[in-house]
Image: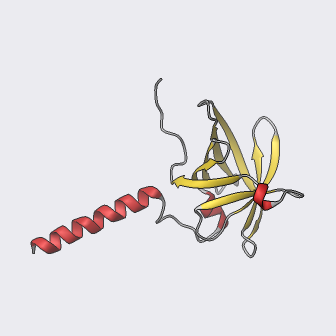
Amino acid sequence: MRRLVAFSLVCLGLIVVLSGCGLLRDTATLSARLQGHWFSDDAIDYYFGPLDATTGQGSLIIVDADGVRTDQYYSIVEENADESLLTLLYQGDEEREITFYIPEDGIFMQEREAGVDPENAMDYTFIDTAIEPLEYEE
């Protein structure tokens, strides 16, 4: 009986740890894969929130390397599941359209720009399922 209880606790602990890392998150669609905390090659944190069913917009919080936070919104322009491409419209001080390649595992994503070799494109790494940064005091 003790072994069963110990095994159950270990399994429960693993589920909690893995879900916190995002390994158990929904990756069925491109928009689902996008949600969460991403870190770019240029040391910027991106937090993509879920899309609001009414407005079709999701929150986008960007925190640069100096810790400066910018709040924006995004909406989906096009979702091409066959090619794993998701085109977004960033809406903040100015609007900007950007396309991401997000493979099925959802661990990495890459910007895709016309005329830019994918080897030279900006890469992003999935960090966790957080949709906003932790609040802290300096």
Counting from the top left corner in percent of width and height, residue 103 is at: 65, 68
Q: Residue at x 63, y 58 (%)?
A: 34
Instruction: Please say if 61 is above or below 120.
Output: above
Q: How many marks?
A: 0
Quarter of the image where one finds residue 65:
top right
Q: Residue at x 78, y 34 (%)?
A: 93
In the image as oriented, which residue stretches furthest toward the left? 1
In the image as oriented, which residue stretches furthest toward the right? 115
Q: Residue at x 54, y 43 (%)?
A: 132
Q: Residue at x 23, y 70 (%)?
A: 8
Instruction: Please say if 119 is above or below 72.
Output: below
Side of 138 relative to 102 (left or right)? left
Q: Nearer the viewer, residue 39 or 72?
A: 39
Counting from the top left corner in percent of width and height, residue 69 is at: 62, 33
Instruction: Please say if 52 is above or below 5.
Output: above
Counting from the top left corner in percent of width and height, residue 111 is at: 75, 56
In the image as oriented, which residue stretches furthest toward the top? 138
Is residue 88 something one can see in this rendering? yes
Side of 127 relative to 64 (left or right)? left
Q: Quadrant of the N terminus?
A: bottom left
Counting from the top left corner in percent of width and height, residue 50 is at: 60, 54
Side of 137 relative to 56 (left or right)? left
Quarter of the image where one finds residue 56:
bottom right
Q: Nearer the viewer, residue 80 or 75?
A: 80
